[in-house]
Amino acid sequence: MSLQDHGTAVRECVSCKRCYDHTVQFCPDCMVELVNIELIPRLINKRYRLESVIERSDTGIVFAATDTATQQEVAVKVIRAGTIAEPRAQDRFKVEVQLAMQLQHPQIAAVYDFGILPDASAYVVSEMVPGTLLREEMKRVNKFPPRQAVAILAQIAEALDAAHKAGLVHRDLRPENIVLLLAKSDQLEIKICDFGFAKIPTGRRITERLAAKIKSLGQLPSSPSYMSPEQFRGEDADLRSDIYSLGVIAYEMLGGRPPFSAKSISELGLKHLTEKPPPLRPLNPEVNALLEAAVMKALEKEPQRRQQRAAELKQELTAAAHLS
């Protein structure tokens, strides 16, 4: 019997995104009738009280929550059951989250807890990171000066390198899960959030039909624009897939637009698989040849032609910025 049969699913105000117990019918502030959120309970693991919806994606829902044991504000991501429905997927999920819990890095959001819910969906509890999303800053700035872009990109690369050394691949790196923080020195610092513990099914090229299917299962990254060619081919993503995603972010930060755009995922995938990105320097004359070369190398179609470590990409970006 489902949680909704018991009437215990968390309820959400579609206007203000706040969460309430199943006994509440209307949002007291917005006077909007509340709706149940799938099969998710308000209190997860008898400890994490869901307070509001932060983000919805194809893989699940991220909530702002309160850890009632410590009164600490945390982020709780509930991953849809279909995402980890494949054989051994739950075991793989548990191993990867445990690795993330052991990883302590100042530029990676800490992971505190995880578990499986009664309906076979999963949850991950992590650090709540206040700040500005890189996506918001990209909308504001459009084209970043090279030195500013590299200052951000180098930190992302350094954090990725630490994760890769710990055996973790992000798989869903995008501007929406990179947070910019203002440090005491008035210098921007970053934190990477929301590692993609759910994987795309392997062995199948992502076509429009397959995309619709895996999207319904919650296994398609939220922003296909940042997917690597191997992800579009349905192959396992290793650390060089993260390097490709960071290359897309770098291109967009410097050029003011992503290297590829399309009206459908199959058209977008074809471009990532076969087309060379347009030159970057005509889009931003401040970009020197060395910086353009570093970004273009990260965007190579075949993983073996890219930088083989995120630290290598950081080194190339930093060296190019010094010549600007």
Image: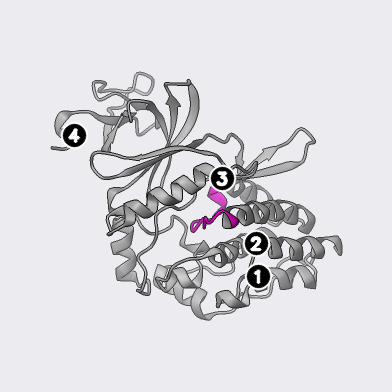
Q: Quadrant of the N terminus?
A: top left
Q: Main secondary structure of the magenta part?
A: loop
The residue type indicated by label 1 comes to Gln
- Look at the numbered discs 1 and 3 and tell me whether their residues touch, using CB distance below 8 Å: no
Secondary element type, mark 3:
loop
Ranked by sequence position, the earlier of labels 2 and 4 is 4
Horizontal side, residue 2 vs residue 161: left or right: left
Residue under numbered circle 2: 310
Residue at image x 48%, y 31%?
Answer: 74
Residue 119 place in picture, x, y as percent? 23, 42
Q: Which residues are magenta?
A: 165-177
Secondary element type, mark 1:
loop
Q: CA distance from mark 3 to mark 2?
A: 17 Å
| Residue 288 - label | none
Q: Crowdedness of circle 4 by 10 Å Cα count: few (<14), some, many (20+)?
A: some
Ranked by sequence position, the earlier of labels 3 and 2 is 3
Secondary element type, mark 4:
helix
Residue furthest to the right: 323
Horizontal side, residue 192 vs residue 211: left or right: right
Horizontal side, residue 283 vs residue 222: left or right: right
Q: CA distance from mark 1 to mark 2?
A: 7 Å
Q: CA distance from mark 1 to mark 4?
A: 49 Å
Ranked by sequence position, the earlier of labels 1 and 4 is 4
- Look at the numbered discs 4 and 3 and tell me whether their residues touch, using CB distance below 8 Å: no
Residue under numbered circle 3: 103
The residue type indicated by label 2 comes to Ala
Taking the magenta stretch, the answer to whether it contains residue 171 is yes
| Residue 4 - label | 4
